[in-house]
Image (spheres, rainbow, N blue to C red):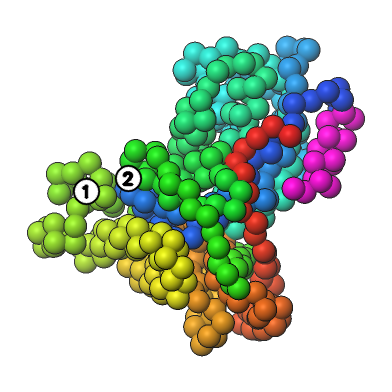
Amino acid sequence: MNHKLINRVKKAFSKEFHSNSLMIFSPGRINIIGEHTDYNDGYVFPAAVDKGIVAAFEKSSVTSSKVIALDLDEFYEFEIDSFVPQREQLWANYILGVIDELSKREFQIKNFNLVFAGDLPNGAGMSSSAALENSVVFGLNKLFELGLSKEEMIFISQKAEHNYVGVHCGIMDQYASIFGLKDQALHLDCRSIKATPFKIDLEDYQFLLINTNVKHILSESAYNNRREVCEYISSLLGVKALRDVSELDLITIKDKVSDEDFQKALFVIQENKRTIEATKAMSDGKLKRLGELIYASHHGLQHQYQVSCKELDFLVDATRDKEYLLGARMMGGGFGGCTINIIKTSEVDSFNQYIKEAYFNMFNVQCSIYDVTLSDGTHQL
Ligand code: GAF
């Protein structure tokens, strides 16, 4: 837990409002494997981490609400029953979107004050958006005693992202952020929304994230486009989602779709299988196999699904000849953000030095490296 961050939010809140606030922590996530499978009703294998959003709330004593984004040094004021999506302060849409979803469901929300800040790097593919949305729905649920279940909350957060932010995301990020468990990853079935927790024991290995520190433009429209392709192919096959088909089923419509779209659907079917196999490898302690599946996932994301970029590919390729690295792949939606690596703990320091230099020499940009600790989901502090 980042106590500095908590104190910073507390202090800012009491400076602006009152000292008695409701404090919420909502984490970001990693995803071991199972990328772009969630909106295909498939399987994912994420875990909440110890980095996220700290948010402080109180009911407002005036007829307006004020939200302060501490890291941006910006604020936004509005009235609870009259606001519209923002074009300038885009961050406000994550909050307004949640309120909008709550009012669509006829929950009675009054004006409130909120201060938030975080320690998740923006655009790193670690789900700062879901962490923020969840902190808001979780905080408002407590503040106004709405009686929402965690499952209801994640769907509200997801819809906020669809309708106010415009990204037609799946449910993985919101689920992992709210339901995360310390030292465990969640094998989530995105159709039944039921997860099996897996204790993560990487022996003398560990996860390491490397942030490219780039985010290529149009990543959001490319994300929505991938989802549309999957839905189109499902409709051609007469199924609800790609989760329902095998590679053999897909071949039956090969001549009706472009080769590019065929490869995208094939990726989803194969990634789903890899995710199931990965959980088995994890519970059998077959870390080498887990690493192979992670490399295969990247290969598919790069060549079939086409959501990688040169910076991510470089970081993955740079690990291939290192016998102390079991696997590496891009993580999250793609087009930038982080790679996730399984690396021998004793080699972390020397690898960090090597990769920082190699990446800088190649792109003239610094990469950032993070250790992660698997942690509990959204909770009151
Ligand atoms: C983003 C989305 F928000 C998730 O729902 C998921 O689709 C992921 O990209 C790709 O696996 O994080």
Q: Quadrant of the C terminus?
A: top right
Q: Quadrant of residue 93?
A: top right
In the image, 235 versus 272, the foreground residue is: 272
Question: Do labels 1 and 2 touch, CB within 8 Å?
Answer: yes
| Of callouts 1 and 2, the N-terminal one | 2
Instruction: Tell me if mark 1 has few (under 14), some (14-19) or many (20+) residues whose alpha carbon lies within 10 angstroms of its own.
Output: some
Q: In the displayed structure, would residue 365 be above or below residue 126? A: below
Query: Which mark, residue 314?
Result: none
Identify the residue shown where x is 65% and y is 27%.
Answer: 139
Secondary structure of residue under mark 1: helix
Place of residue 118 in the rendered image (x, y in percent of width and height, measured from the top left): 72, 46
Q: Residue at x 62, y 16 (%)?
A: 145
Residue 14 is a magenta residue: yes
**x%, y% of residue 119?**
72, 50
Question: How many residues crowd around disc 2 within 10 Å: few (fewer than 14), some, or many (20 or more)?
Answer: many
Residue 338 spot, x, y in % from top left: 57, 64
Q: List the residue tagged with mark 2.
A: 41
Q: Is residue 373 left or right of residue 262?
A: right
Q: Residue furthest front?
A: 284
Task: Kindly tell me whether residue 331 is visible in this rendering.
Answer: yes
Q: Is residue 333 left or right of residue 72?
A: left
State the mark number for residue 244.
1
Q: Residue at x 74, y 31 (%)?
A: 23
Amino acid type at mark 1: Asp
Q: Residue at x 67, y 83 (%)?
A: 354
Residue 278, above or below 347: above
Instruction: Read off the magenta span.
Output: 1-15
Question: Is residue 324 magenta-colored?
Answer: no
State the predominant SS element of the stretch in magenta.
Answer: helix
Along the line of sight, the residue nearer the viewer: 206 or 43: 206
Decide if residue 59 is on the left or right side of residue 46: right
Amino acid marked by disc 2 = Asp
